[in-house]
Image (tube, rainbow, N blue to C red):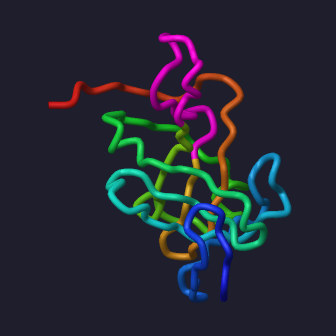
Amino acid sequence: MKVESPVFGALDVSADKILEFPAGLPGFEDCKRFTLVHEEGAKSILMLQSVDDPQIVFSLAGADTLGVNYEFSLTDDEAALIDLGSAEDAAVAVIVHKAPPEASPATAGLQANFMAPIVINTQSRKGLQKVISKLGCDVTLRARE
């Protein structure tokens, strides 16, 4: 399948590289199929490229690559939606973005959305975005060495 990405240009995406988000992503419910693309030179950042709407691209980072220990629970319905039977099959990432240059020093740099992580079942290749409405998860920041 050919995808014309505004970030990567023409991409050839094979069927086994497509991730399905049965409920879409909040605000992008019509985008149900995505692929992960590794941006040149960015080792810890992946791009979640929509196959349904090539204009939609999100930057993702694993919480562990940001030096964060991150734990939260999925409901039974959420686990069933992505056919998740074992926590070992879950990959968790957060959407990250760079603050605009005019941002204040307090908000400058890379920002991560820990209140809405992306959860992907690595076996079924299905995913969801877990929206956490109140802080009910554990987040531990580690200093990088």
Q: Is residue 100 magenta?
A: yes
Q: What range is drawn magenta here?
A: 98-117
Q: Residue at x 27, y 27 (%)?
A: 142
From the viewer's perspective, is 2 left or right of 123?
right
Q: Residue at x 70, y 71 (%)?
A: 33
Can you give x and y, in whole percent of width and height, for residue 126 in the image? 62, 69
In-image side of 29 versus 74 (left or right): right
Q: Give the x, y percent position of residue 45.
A: 42, 52
Q: Nearer the viewer, residue 91 or 31?
A: 31
Confirm whether the magenta stretch covers residue 99.
yes
Look at 43% across and 27% down and name the residue there. 139
55 sits to left or right of 91 = right
Residue 36 image offset from top left, x and y in percent: 52, 67
Relative height, residue 91 to residue 112 (above, below): below
Quarter of the picture containing the C terminus is top left
Horizontally, is 8 left or right of 70 in the view? right
Residue 8 pos. (x, y %): 55, 67
Q: Residue at x 35, y 51 (%)?
A: 44
**Up-down relation of residue 48 to residue 140 (above or below):** below
